[in-house]
């Protein structure tokens, strides 16, 4: 292997691999050439230079996924990127990667912006950019046609209120609960666990029949279903709760009722004891299992556009505003420290504290007036 300087700022790379000669030309400084040469060597060994240049978006994605995303990124990021690609590949997968026009991508992102939050749209764009930038770096494609050409769509959705306790009013919460009485019992149980107990989606998916005590209405949170590493690949499996937040909580009766129906009336439980599972795979339901029904209920009942995770926040805010001490709220939510709870729900805490101060001030003035009259 070698680097030959052909002219000022022009370098030629050569590499013999498995009896075949590979060459490439690089334009830039000597320092940049050394780095690019290393990428060239890795690319030859990966077989990048043996692939056809007219890669489809699916083929380009597969290469970047195998050699970068699935090996170098965090498990949760891998899952997030997989969810994005599940939307992108059916639309663009069969198209030749280099021939997809920026306007086509921008139109598609504008269409998605009617359903997804702005941060999600940025993520879709980030996935595109990552795949194309890696494609250019590994010389699979000549250039990234989207660099600096795509505008982020404007937010057409209703702006979310800043205070978590104002996500839904009491009347809207009632509407949500009643709407789910007509839904599948599994959907109902999942939503009620988030709203009534503040459980994370990953914790709900990990619940087993042995975690529920119907005599005491208690629920043990001992695991979550999330991304884990196995044989250098990211898969979903059991792991301990986030921040090791093992805990047992007492559930309201409206949460226990659908769980009782699932376990005792239906008696359709997975072989591993999962309450929420896919009967075809015998594995826990997907992370998107509850999302579609929630979206339908929200649209049908004209409720504010909330996410499943917002139900956990709503549960915590209601507890804080009802006067539950912050340590109890933190323990119930499985927060690692009380400061996490305080920082997240400071508004509700401050409102409660202000009411205490106002009431005490009012009471003090009443006492003061009585003292004046007695004189």
Image: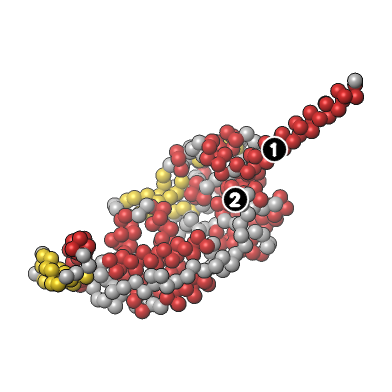
The single residue placed furthest to the top in the displayed view is: 375
Between the residue at mark 1 and the residue at mark 2, the CA separation in whole angstroms equals 25 Å
Pinpoint residue 91: horizontal percent, then vertical percent: 44, 74
Q: Residue furthest front?
A: 8
339, above or below 29, in the image: above
Locate residue 355: give its quadrant.
top right
For the question of whether residue 30 can be seen, the reply is yes
Pinpoint residue 268: horizontal percent, then vertical percent.
Answer: 52, 52
Above/below status of 267 relative to 337: below
How many numbered marks, from 0 up?
A: 2
Identify the image quadrant of the C terminus.
top right
Specify how the rendered protein is coloured: secondary structure
Q: Which residue is mark 1?
A: 354
Among the two numbered marks 1 and 2 on one chain, the one whose residue lies closer to the N terminus:
2
Q: Is residue 49 left or right of residue 78?
A: left
Q: Position of residue 274 (x, y in %)?
A: 48, 48
How packed mark 1 is, by other alpha carbons closer than 10 Å (few <14, some 14-19, many 20 or more), is few
Residue 346, image quadrant: top right
């Amino acid at each position: 292997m070698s680097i030959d300087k052909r002219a000022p700022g022009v370098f030629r790379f050569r590499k013999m691999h498995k009896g075949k000669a590979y060459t490439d030309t690089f334009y830039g400084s000597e320092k940049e050439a050394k780095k690019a040469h290393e990428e060239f060597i890795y690319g030859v060994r990966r077989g990048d230079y043996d692939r056809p240049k007219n890669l489809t978006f699916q083929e380009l994605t597969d290469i970047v996924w195998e050699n970068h995303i699935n090996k170098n990124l965090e498990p949760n990021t891998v899952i997030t990127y997989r969810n994005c690609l599940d939307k992108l590949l059916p639309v663009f997968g069969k198209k030749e990667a280099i021939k997809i026009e920026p306007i086509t991508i921008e139109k598609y992102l504008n269409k998605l912006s009617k359903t997804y939050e702005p941060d999600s749209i940025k993520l879709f764009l980030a996935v595109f950019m990552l795949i194309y930038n890696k494609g250019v770096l590994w010389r699979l494609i000549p250039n990234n046609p989207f660099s600096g050409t795509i505008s982020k769509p404007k937010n057409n959705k209703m702006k979310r209120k800043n205070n978590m306790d104002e996500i839904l009013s009491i009347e809207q919460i009632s509407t949500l609960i009643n709407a789910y009485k007509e839904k599948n019992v599994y959907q109902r149980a999942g939503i009620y666990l988030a709203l009534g107990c503040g459980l994370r989606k990953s914790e709900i998916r990990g619940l087993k029949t042995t975690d529920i005590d119907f005599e005491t209405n208690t629920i043990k949170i001992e695991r979550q279903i999330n991304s884990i590493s196995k044989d250098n690949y990211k898969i979903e499996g059991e792991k301990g709760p986030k921040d090791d937040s093992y805990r047992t909580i007492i559930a309201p009766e409206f949460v226990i009722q659908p769980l009782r129906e699932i376990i005792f009336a239906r008696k359709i439980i997975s072989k591993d004891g999962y309450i929420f599972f896919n009967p075809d795979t015998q594995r826990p339901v997907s992370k998107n299992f509850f999302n579609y029904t929630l979206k339908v209920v929200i649209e049908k009942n004209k409720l504010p556009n909330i996410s499943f995770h917002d139900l956990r926040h709503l549960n915590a805010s209601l507890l804080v505003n009802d006067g539950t001490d912050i340590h109890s709220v933190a323990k119930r939510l499985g927060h690692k420290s009380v400061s996490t709870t305080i920082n997240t729900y400071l508004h509700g805490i401050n409102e409660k504290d202000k009411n205490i101060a106002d009431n005490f001030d009012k009471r003090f003035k009443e006492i003061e007036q009585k003292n004046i009259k007695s004189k």
